[in-house]
Amino acid sequence: MKTLGMALACLVRQWRWVNDERLKPLGLTQSRWITLSYLKLEDGILQHQLARRVGVEQPSLVRTLDGLEQMGLVERRPCPSDRRGKRVYLTAAAGPVLAQMDEVLDETRQQVLAGLSEQEIREFNRMIEHLTQNLQGIGKDISAATAG
């Protein structure tokens, strides 16, 4: 019997696999399209913050960013307020790729959510937000316990 956590992990894994397969023609691997999705939300973010958002270690993100730079989609610039930090920016060339990426992601989203009412989708999003807040609270408790 699957636990809720296992069911959610399976759902996310399948959803990402579908998107990954559909985005391959654009040269976007899972790590690349996820990174671009976060940059679209926070263009110019510090590289170490982007790694945290994406959920990877710095060396993994560096490899992803190297690939995205080679494609001409991102650039890293020194951070004026932190000599060790770098900020990551989308380039003008990223615009058309992001538009195509969004079309693919939107199509997948529509297909995955087919048959659910707008109210069901809103309620599901509310529950996800609630679970996220609970997990963040647990994470803070764990961090406090291990720090002390």
Image (spheres, grey):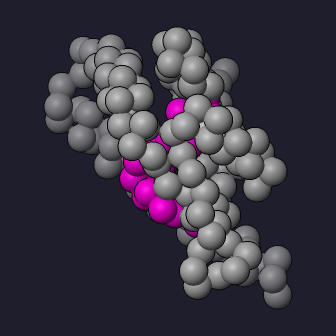
From what the image shows, is residue 111 above or below residue 95?
Answer: above
- Relative side of 72 to 31, left or right: left
Image coordinates for residue 34, horizontal then vertical, percent: 54, 38
User: Viewer-proximal residue, 60 or 55?
Assistant: 60
Quadrant position of residue 107: top left
Quadrant position of residue 83: bottom right
> Does residue 16 appear in this view?
yes
- Relative side of 8 to 119, left or right: right
> Does residue 49 appear in this view?
no
On-image quarter of the C terminus: bottom right
Q: Residue at x 56, y 57 (%)?
A: 88
Number of residue marks = 0
Q: Which range of residues does the magenta coloring cover?
A: 30-46
Q: Residue at x 17, y 31 (%)?
A: 118
From what the image shows, is residue 113 above or below residue 21?
Answer: below
User: Viewer-proximal residue, 23 or 72?
Assistant: 72
Image coordinates for residue 36, horizontal then vertical, percent: 50, 41
From what the image shows, is residue 83 above or below residue 89?
Answer: below
Most extreme residue toward the left, as rendered?
118
Q: Residue 122 in magenta?
A: no
- Relative side of 130 to 73, left or right: left
Q: Residue at x 60, y 57 (%)?
A: 76
Image coordinates for residue 55, horizontal then vertical, percent: 66, 50
On-image quarter of the N terminus: top right
Q: Residue 40 in magenta?
A: yes
Image coordinates for residue 43, horizontal then vertical, percent: 44, 57
Q: Residue at x 33, y 43 (%)?
A: 125
Secondary structure mostly seen in the magenta stretch: helix
Most extreme residue toward the bottom, as rendered?
148
Quadrant position of residue 50: bottom right
